[in-house]
Image (cartoon, rainbow, N blue to C red):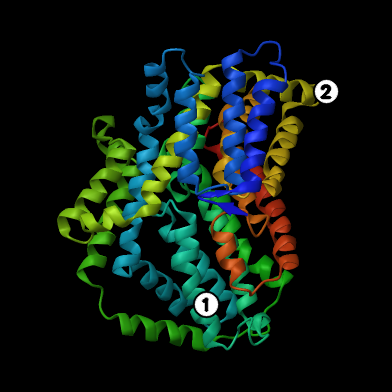
Amino acid sequence: MKVGGINILPGIISVVLILLIWFVIPVPEGVSANAWHLLALFVGTIAAIIGKVMPIGAIAVVAIALVALTGVTNANRSIAMKDALSGFSNSLIWLIGIAVIISRGLTKTGLGRRIGYAFISVFGKKTIGVGYALALSDLVIAPVTPSNTARGGAIIHPIMKSIAAGFNSSPEQGTSRKIGHYLSLVSYHANTITSGMFITATAPNPLIVKLIADATGAKISITWGTWALAALLPGVVCILLLPMIIYALYPPELKETPNASQQAKAKLAEMGPIAYGEKVMIGVFAMLLLLWANIPGMIFGEAFAVNTTTVAFMGLSVLLVSGVLTWEDVLQEKSAWDTIVWFSALVMMATYLNKLGLVQWFSHVIEGNIADFGLGWEASALILVCVYLYAHYFFASSTAHVTAMFAAFYSAGLALGAPPLYLGLLLAGASSIMMSLTHYATGTSPIIFGSGYVSMGDWWKAGFLMSVINLVIWGVVGGLWWKALGYW
């Protein structure tokens, strides 16, 4: 039941959780009252996000107000207000927000669709080739689309549906298994893999970078280039295996699809030559990748390195000056401003939970329980990562999951002796792999699942299998790759 802007039942549950932690559950030894009270607000906020009490941005505004009003970060209310708003000064948050706005250009100019149809025109003569085309299309645009939902749901999914419809494969006709079932699973799981390959591929990734830096006293500061290089080999291996695994698990009825290539070529012909806006987008895309990867710094010295968020502002500036995007486009990109608001609130709360010592206390609890098994750091890290990943069955938001659990699990792993960068990269990979599990795991899943091509049973079965395979690849192939790179 909904009253006003609130879903009543989950709203009541969120409030009850806050009151229970604040007033009923005793403050544990070694934890300050302020830290415990902030935890109460934090748990209530996460519960409200999971329960969809209100839109996540609205929940964030309420959380900011409560932090300022209760003075849990500082008894001085003026300072508490500054603390509550401190998340807005985090440059990584603005990196994601600006990148979301930039990605609007992919849709507005049609470049995203052109990339997808171009891959299909080359690889689309067989069904498995169409699967690879969709996966590669997602990979190519992932670095500049930090909304995995926009990338998978608004760009790739319509292309996939168009191809399926061209072969009369639809849930309404009972012909999903002809090709649509297969392409839905491939395109979805490709989206979860590419989300882990770049800092700018999904919104929680910059938060992970910050949490790792906080936990290590800034000794581990993962750059865009470091992340991309680390994820390159395991990510590419996952992408290469994905269409074949899904093909073996759920073979499509149609194996040959010469018409798909023809359809794609027809769509490209319909779009005409590459337009001015698309050319500008390609130029901006190239500039972002070169500067985010710090190529000038590697060639000419660190004096030529540019801050990652500065690069994003540069890219947006070019699009505005060139007229590819207008200021009206910027204002209308609601998802970007929404992300900046809720991301700022969650980062603020996570930051002060760490400053007030709550994260360290909780990580000691986790560490102590695992240490009782007497295992080495390798087995301990595996247990931590598996618990962290499969806890996502209880989450409908990867951001909420990362905010709630990443810092404590990472700190516990460090205390158990795991190499800091290895553990950080493995947990970062798991933070995207976990999106494969359910039909509510992230924003992309209800869009693709909702199209009706895949049953819930098939979705969950494929999700669990792909999570195991991708985690093994990230841990083994990734671990060896990171060792070769000297990361641990």
Q: CA–CA distance between discs 1 and 2?
A: 51 Å
Q: Nearer the viewer, residue 266 or 83?
A: 83
Which corner quadrant of the image does residue 401 belong to?
A: top right
Please indicate, yes or no, whether residue 483 appears anywhere in the rendered image.
no
Instruction: Tell me: 87 left or right of 134.
Output: left
Amino acid type, residue under disc 1 in the picture = Lys
Name the residue located 43 percent from the left edge and 26 percent from the top edge.
Answer: 84
At x 60% / y 69%, what residue is drawn? 450
Q: Residue furthest front?
A: 3
Where 255 falls versus 402 (above or below)? Answer: below
Of badges 1 and 2, the one in the foreground is: 1
81 is higher (above) or lower (below) than 293: above
Front position in the image: 74 or 319: 74
Side of 220 relative to 475 (left or right): left
SS class, disc 1: helix
Residue most toward the right? 373
Q: Amino acid at mark 2?
A: Gly
**Where residue 192 sits in the image (x, y, percent)?**
57, 55
Specify few, some or many for label 2: CA neighbours under 10 Å numbering under 14, 14-19, or 20 or more.
few
Locate the C terminus by quadrant.
top right
Is any part of residue 24 visible from this angle? yes
Q: On the image, numbered disc 2 is attached to which residue?
A: 374
Secondary structure state at the residue bearing disc 2: loop
Callout 1 environment at 10 Å: few (<14), some (14 to 19), or many (20+)? Answer: some
Q: Position of residue 274 (x, y in %)?
A: 26, 73
Q: Which mark is residue 161?
A: 1
- Label disc, if present, on residue 194 of the rendered structure: none
Q: For residue 167, what is the image quadrant?
A: bottom right
**On the image, which quarter does residue 265 sit in?**
bottom left
Residue closer to the observer: 231 or 8: 8
Q: Is residue 310 above or below residue 145?
A: above
Residue at the image position 73 percent from the left and 37 percent from the top: 382
